[in-house]
Amino acid sequence: MLFYFVIKAIFNADRSERDAMARAEELQDAEDARKARPEPEKNGNHEIDPS
């Protein structure tokens, strides 16, 4: 019986860690995508539209 609870706790901890890692990767991907977008160039107080 004790073996069952120990194994169950290990699996639950592993699942929680995988969920946390997935969330961290999603946040990092979003941050990388935000940084990859070119920022509009500015000329004084006027923005220059690159399109």
Image (cartoon, rainbow, N blue to C red):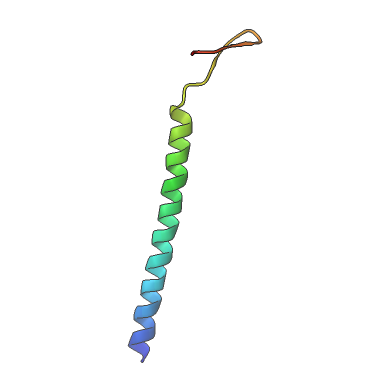
Residue furthest toward the right? 45
Asked if 20 appears above or below 48 in the picture, the reply is: below
Residue furthest toward the front? 51
Asked if 20 appears above or below 7 in the picture, the reply is: above
Asked if 37 appears above or below 8 in the picture, the reply is: above
Q: Residue at x 35, y 86 (%)?
A: 4
Spot occupied by residue 26 in the image (x, y as percentages of width and height): 44, 47
Q: Residue at x 45, y 57 (%)?
A: 20
Residue furthest toward the top? 44
Q: Residue at x 41, y 53 (%)?
A: 22
Q: Quadrant of the N terminus?
A: bottom left
Spot occupied by residue 11 in the image (x, y as percentages of width and height): 36, 73
Corner quadrant of residue 48: top right
- Residue 49 shown left or right of residue 16 in the figure: right
- Residue 39 shown left or right of residue 46 in the figure: left
| Mark count | 0
Q: Which of 3 and 36 is in front in this view?
A: 36
Spot occupied by residue 18 in the image (x, y as percentages of width and height): 39, 60
Corner quadrant of residue 16: bottom left
Spot occupied by residue 38 in the image (x, y as percentages of width and height): 47, 22
